[in-house]
Image: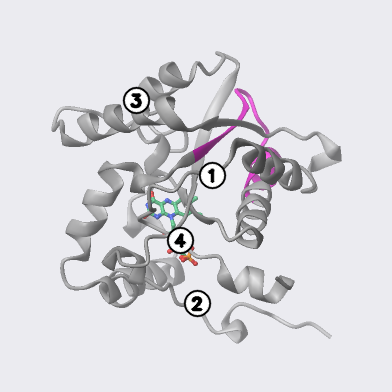
């Protein structure tokens, strides 16, 4: 697969089939993602990969917490209310909700909530961590690492989802994963094979016109 096809193939998959990914392949994907540049080659990102029984345990815990009205979310990076984002970002997010997501049908919010509650049936989740007192530069590195991982997956025809949802119940998840006290659990990337029959996978996110993103200075 050439690079252009790879980058065009990757998209957020929100429901995976039950087909598992061989552990050796998961290790290869992380090894490729390690090729990502980082601040002075500090290589701050660590990956905890849950599959099989461990993931089933985490999924059950997540479903239970999602259904509990008293359960509090405690993500490592706090959510920012949409009205506090800049105007262009607000317009893009609104467009996603009004146009992009509705490709999954009118009841997409219900489908999305159901899928989220079951961790999108991801067959492997790569949880990414940084040292507790990380520099913001490490967050830049983690974002780049994530994209490398997802593109490496695309080449292997493995689908992916980067999601806040995976780590929004941070403390119970830390315990389930046995994350050391000196590591901050940032977010996760779900991997698997897209269920082509799932309506929720019909969502195709649009993009701004490049001329609205680029400022050329000659
Ligand atoms: C940091 C981050 C967190 C995200 N969290 C979620 C999430 O919790 N639930 C979800 O359904 N999608 C989540 N997404 C997926 C985005 O909604 C998706 O990437 C965006 O709409 C663009 O669509 P595309 O990935 O198909 O190009 C997240 C993406 C990123 C980068």
**140 in the magenta segment:** yes
Q: In this figure, which residue is indicated by the disc labeled 3? A: 57
Near-viewer residue (119 or 80): 119
Secondary structure of the residue carrying numbered label 3: helix
The answer to whether residue 79 is visible is no
Near-viewer residue (217 or 12): 12
Q: For ligand 1, tell me if the residue under mark 4 lies within 8 Å.
A: yes
Residue 194, placed above or below residue 36: below
The residues tagged by marks 4 and 2 sit, at their Cα atoms, a distance apart of 14 Å
Near-viewer residue (137 or 9): 9
Residue drawn 27% across and 29% down? 60
Instruction: Tell me how the rendering is colored.
Output: one colour
Q: Quadrant of residue 49?
A: top right
Residue 122, placed above or below residue 43: below
Image mark for residue 21: 1
Closer to the N terminus: mark 1 or mark 3? 1
Q: In this figure, which residue is indicated by the disc labeled 2? A: 207
């Amino acid at each position: 697969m050439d690079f252009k096809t790879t980058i065009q193939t990757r998209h957020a998959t929100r429901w995976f089939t039950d087909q598992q990914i061989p552990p050796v392949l998961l290790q290869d994907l992380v090894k490729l993602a390690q090729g990502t540049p980082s601040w002075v080659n500090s290589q701050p990102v660590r990956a905890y990969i849950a599959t099989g029984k461990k993931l089933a345990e985490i999924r059950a815990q997540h479903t239970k917490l999602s259904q509990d009205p008293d359960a509090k979310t405690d993500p490592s990076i706090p959510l920012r209310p949409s009205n506090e984002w800049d105007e262009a970002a607000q317009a893009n997010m609104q467009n996603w909700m009004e146009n992009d997501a509705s490709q999954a049908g009118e009841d997409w919010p219900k489908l999305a909530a159901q899928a989220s509650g079951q961790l999108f049936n991801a067959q492997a989740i790569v949880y990414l961590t940084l040292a507790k007192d990380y520099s913001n530069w490490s967050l830049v590195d983690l974002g780049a690492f994530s994209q490398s991982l997802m593109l490496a997956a695309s080449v292997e025809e493995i689908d992916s989802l980067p999601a806040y949802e995976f780590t929004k119940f941070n403390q119970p998840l830390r315990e389930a994963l046995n994350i050391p006290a000196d590591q901050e659990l940032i977010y996760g990337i779900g991997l698997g094979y897209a269920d082509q029959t799932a309506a929720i996978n019909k969502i195709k996110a649009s993009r701004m016109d490049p001329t609205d993103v680029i400022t050329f200075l000659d």
